[in-house]
Image (cartoon, helix red, strand yellow):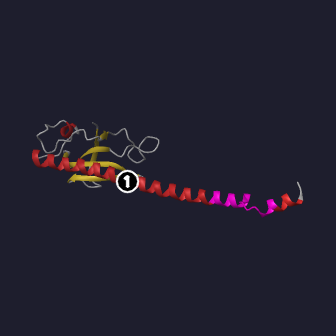
Amino acid sequence: MNLQNIKKLKNEKGFTIVELLIVIVVIGILAAIVIVAYQGVTARANTSTAQSTATSVMKKIEAYAAEEGAYPATVSALTGAAATKSYTLQGAGITFTAAASPLTAKPAGTTADPNDKVTFYTCSSGTPSVQVGNKVRYWNFTDKNFAEVYAGACASTGQTYTAVGP
C-alpha cells in the first residue's frame, strides 16, 4: 500500500468495535426491561381471567341457591342442570379440580395451571354439619398465591371446606 491509499482509508468514517459493543449492550438492556414489563402484564391478564371465571361460577351458585333453596353440593348440580335453569354452567371452558391440587402451593404445571381452572368447595358448619355455602378458589398469577370467592355464609375461618371434583 502506498501512502496515498493509507491517507484515503484514514479519512473514511465508520464505527469502531467499542461503539458497536455499546449499542449491543444498550439493546440488551432495553430488551430485558420489555420482557419484565410484558410478564407483569401477562400475569395481571391471567389473574383477571381467573377471577372472572371464579366470579362467574359464584353467580351460578347464587342463582342455584335462589332457585333451589340450598347451595349446590356438587359441581354436577351446575354443569348437569337443565338448559332452562338460570344456574346452568355450560362447559364454558371451565376446568374444575378437586383435592388433588395442593391447597397451599402453586398449581402443578410448568408455568401455572390454566387461568380457567378453579377448585369448587362446599363449606359447612355446626353439629351436625350443615352446608352453608360454597367457596371457589383460583390462582392469582400476580401475587403467586390462591385467591378465593365465597357464596352463602362461608367465611375464611370457622368452617369445614370439602373440595368437590367434577
Which residue is located at x 33 percent, y 50 percent?
Answer: 49
- Is any atom of residue 143 visible in this view? no
121 or 24: nearer the viewer: 24
Left or right for 85, reference 101: left
Q: Which secondary structure lies at badge 1?
A: helix
What residue sits right under mark 1 in the picture? 45
Q: Could you tell me the amino acid type at mark 1?
A: Ala
Quarter of the image for the C terminus: give it: top left
Farthest residue, direction bottom: 11
Tally the marks. 1
Residue 24 magenta: yes
Q: Is residue 16 above or below residue 64?
A: below
Q: Residues within 10 Å of mark 1 (few under 14, many from 20)?
A: some
Residue 147 magenta: no
Spot occupied by residue 139 in the image (x, y as percentages of width and height): 37, 49
Which residue is located at x 21 percent, y 39 percent?
Answer: 90
166 or 90: nearer the viewer: 90
- Is any atom of residue 44 visible in this view? yes
Quarter of the image for the N terminus: give it: bottom right
103 or 2: nearer the viewer: 2
Spot occupied by residue 75 in the image (x, y as percentages of width and height): 23, 39
Farthest residue, direction right: 2
Spot occupied by residue 125 in the image (x, y as percentages of width and height): 22, 49
Residue stretch in magenta? 8-25
5 or 113: nearer the viewer: 5
Task: Decide whether the magenta segment is chiefly helix, strand or loop.
Answer: helix
Which residue is located at x 89 percent, y 60 percent?
Answer: 3
Q: Is residue 3 above or below residue 124?
A: below
Which residue is located at x 73 percent, y 62 percent?
Answer: 13
Spot occupied by residue 132 in the image (x, y as percentages of width and height): 19, 49
Q: Quadrant of residue 11?
A: bottom right
